[in-house]
Image (spheres, rainbow, N blue to C red):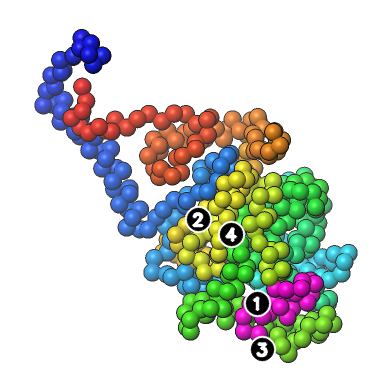
C-alpha cells in the first residue's frame, strides 16, 4: 500500500493475445457502427433538429422528432415553391365546406377533409384545425399534405379559409391579419360544438402560426374561452417578427430570393385587394393606392391599418409579434422553423426555454412551409412527421398546469397512458442503446428515463483488465 498517495499497488493482470484481439474487435465494431452512421448522416445531410426548451414538453418533442434528410439540390426558395405549387397540383383531396358567420359580421369557411374512410372515424377522434398562410387556402400544398397525414393518423383535419380566401366572398371591409384571432377562435368553438368530447389540436403555417400563437396566449390568460382547452399545437415557419421580415424582403437586391419573395407576396395581396375592391372601398381603403403598393409595409399601411384601426404599421406588427405571446401559452406547443427560411426573423429561443409549455425545433435547411425530405417531392414532408409525432405524444401524455411559488410549471398526470408511454420509450432506448441521438438532444433527460450504461469501448481496446 502506497500511503503517500493513498493508492494500492496492484500487479497488472496478464492478458493473452486472444483476449486483446477480442477486445479490439468489440471496440472496433462499436466504433465502426457509430462512425458509419455519422458518416451517412453527413453525406446525406441528415440531422436531428436543435431543440430549445425545458421540461416535459421538450422531452416529448425530443423523443417524437425524427431525423431530417432535406431534399438535395434544392435551395430554400425552390423548396418553398415545390411545397406550395408542385405538391398542390399533385394532391387533390376532397373537402366538405362549412360557411361560418361570426356575430360581428363577415363570412369565412372551414373545409373538413374527406378521406376515403371518413365515416369510419369515431366521433371522439381528435379534431385538427389548420390555419394557412397569407392569402392562402385549403388548396395550398402544405395544407393538403398535413390533412392527408393527420387523417391517416386517425385525426379529423379541418382548414380555416380566411375572409375572401379560398373562393369565399368578402362581404365586409374586415379582412385578415396576423393579430386578428376572432375567426380562428370562432372556428375552434364551432368545431368543439360539432364534435363534443373530441380533443382539439391546432396547427398554423407562416402568418397562421403567428395567429395561432396569439390565440393560444389569449386562451392561456383567459382573454378568450373555449369549451375545452386545446390539447396541443404545432406552429410551422412562423415569421415571429413581421416588421423585420417586411424590411428584409423590401431590401432584397434585384433578382435575389428576397426580391422574388417580396414580389410574389405583394402581388398576391394586390390581386386580393383588386378582387374585393368593392368591400374594401366601403371601409375607406384607397384601392388605387393599393394597386401601386410595392412592399408588404405599404400594403399593411393602406389596408390592414385602415381596417383594424392601427395608427401605424409598427403598431400592427407589434401586436402580432410572437415574442410577447409565447410566454403566456399554456398549451403544449411545438414551433418548427428552418434557419434558411427567408421569412423567419428573430427565433424565440429564450422565450421557449423560459416557458415549459413551448419548445422550439430548428433545422439548418427546409425553406418556408416546406421541409421536403428525401428525393421524392410528393412524399411525406418532415413537417408532417414532426407534427403527427408530437400530437400523438401530447395526447398520450396528459399535462396540467400547477401553480407553485408564483410560477407556472408543467407537471405530469399519472395515467395508464403515461405508463405505456414510458414502456415504449424505454424499449426504444434499449433498441437504440442510447447511441443514435446527438449529445444536444440527450441533455436534460427526464428523471424517469433509465440510466444508460457506459460504452464498453470508451477507453480503447487495450484498456480492459
Q: Is residue 363 above or below residue 305?
A: above
**What whole-number distance in Å separates the C-alpha atoms at marks 3 and 2?**
37 Å
Dot 2 or dot 4, earlier in sequence: 4
Chief secondary structure of the magenta portion = helix
Q: Residue at x 80, y 67 (%)?
A: 99
Q: From the image, state whether disc 1 or disc 4 is nearer to you.
A: 1
Q: Looking at the image, which residue is at 48% across and 72% down?
A: 77
Distance CA(mark 2)–CA(mark 4): 10 Å
Up the image or down, 303 lies above or below 406; here it is below
Quadrant housing the N terminus: top left
Q: Position of residue 442 (x, y in %)?
A: 45, 40
Kindly state the secondary structure of the residue where label 1 is placed: helix
Whether tag 1 and tag 4 are in contact, CB under 8 A, the answer is no
What range is drawn magenta here? 293-313
Q: Which dot, 3 or 4, sits closer to the camera?
A: 3
Which element carries disc 3, helix, strand or loop?
loop
What residue would you read off at disc 3? Answer: 292
Marks 1,2: beta carbons within 8 A: no
Is residue 167 visible to the viewer in this orientation of the structure?
Answer: no
Query: Which residue was labeled with disc 2?
Result: 362
Amino acid at each position: 500500500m502506497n500511503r503517500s498517495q493513498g493508492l494500492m499497488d496492484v500487479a497488472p493482470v496478464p492478458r493473452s493475445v486472444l483476449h486483446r484481439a477480442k477486445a479490439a474487435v468489440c471496440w472496433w465494431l462499436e466504433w465502426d457502427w457509430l462512425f458509419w452512421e455519422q458518416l451517412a448522416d453527413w453525406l446525406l445531410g441528415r440531422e436531428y433538429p436543435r431543440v430549445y426548451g425545458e421540461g416535459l414538453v421538450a422531452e416529448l418533442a425530443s423523443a417524437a422528432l425524427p431525423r431530417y434528410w432535406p431534399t438535395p439540390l434544392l435551395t430554400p426558395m425552390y423548396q418553398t415553391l415545390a411545397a406550395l405549387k408542385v405538391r398542390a397540383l399533385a394532391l387533390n383531396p376532397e373537402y366538405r365546406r362549412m360557411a361560418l358567420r361570426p356575430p360581428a359580421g363577415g363570412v369565412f369557411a372551414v373545409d373538413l377533409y374527406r378521406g376515403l374512410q371518413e365515416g369510419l372515424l369515431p366521433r371522439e377522434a381528435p379534431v385538427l384545425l389548420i390555419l394557412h398562410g397569407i392569402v392562402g387556402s385549403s388548396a395550398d400544398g402544405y395544407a393538403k399534405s398535413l390533412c392527408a397525414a393527420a387523417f391517416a393518423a386517425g385525426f379529423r383535419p379541418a382548414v380555416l379559409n380566411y375572409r375572401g380566401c379560398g373562393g369565399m366572398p368578402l362581404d365586409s371591409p374586415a379582412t385578415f391579419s396576423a393579430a386578428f384571432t376572432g375567426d380562428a377562435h370562432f372556428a375552434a368553438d364551432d368545431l368543439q360544438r360539432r364534435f363534443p368530447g373530441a380533443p382539439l389540436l391546432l396547427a398554423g403555417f407562416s402568418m397562421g402560426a403567428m395567429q395561432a400563437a396569439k390565440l393560444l396566449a389569449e386562451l392561456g390568460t383567459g382573454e378568450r374561452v373555449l369549451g375545452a382547452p386545446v390539447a396541443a399545437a404545432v406552429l410551422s415557419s412562423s415569421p415571429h417578427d413581421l416588421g423585420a421580415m417586411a424590411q428584409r424582403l423590401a431590401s432584397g437586391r434585384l433578382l435575389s430570393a428576397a426580391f422574388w419573395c417580396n414580389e410574389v407576396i405583394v402581388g398576391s395581396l394586390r390581386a386580393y385587394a383588386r378582387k374585393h375592391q368593392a368591400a374594401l372601398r366601403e371601409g375607406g381603403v384607397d384601392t388605387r393606392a393599393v394597386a401601386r403598393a410595392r412592399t408588404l409595409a405599404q400594403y399593411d399601411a393602406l389596408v390592414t391599418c385602415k381596417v383594424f384601426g392601427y395608427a401605424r404599421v409598427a403598431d400592427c406588427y407589434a401586436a402580432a409579434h410572437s415574442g410577447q405571446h409565447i410566454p403566456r401559452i399554456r398549451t403544449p406547443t411545438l414551433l418548427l422553423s428552418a434557419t434558411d427560411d427567408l421569412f423567419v426573423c428573430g427565433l424565440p429561443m429564450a422565450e421557449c426555454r423560459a416557458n415549459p409549455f413551448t419548445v422550439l425545433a430548428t433545422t439548418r435547411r427546409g425553406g418556408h412551409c416546406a421541409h421536403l425530405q428525401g428525393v421524392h417531392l410528393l412524399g411525406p414532408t418532415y413537417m408532417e412527421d414532426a407534427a403527427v409525432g408530437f400530437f400523438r405524444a401530447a395526447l398520450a401524455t396528459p399535462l396540467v398546469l400547477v401553480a407553485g411559488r408564483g410560477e407556472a410549471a408543467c407537471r405530469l398526470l399519472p395515467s395508464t397512458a403515461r405508463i405505456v408511454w414510458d414502456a415504449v420509450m424505454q424499449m426504444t432506448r434499449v433498441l437504440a442503446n442510447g447511441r443514435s441521438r446527438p449529445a444536444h438532444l440527450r441533455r436534460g433527460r427526464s428523471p424517469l428515463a433509465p440510466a444508460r450504461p457506459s460504452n464498453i469501448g470508451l477507453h480503447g481496446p487495450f484498456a480492459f483488465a
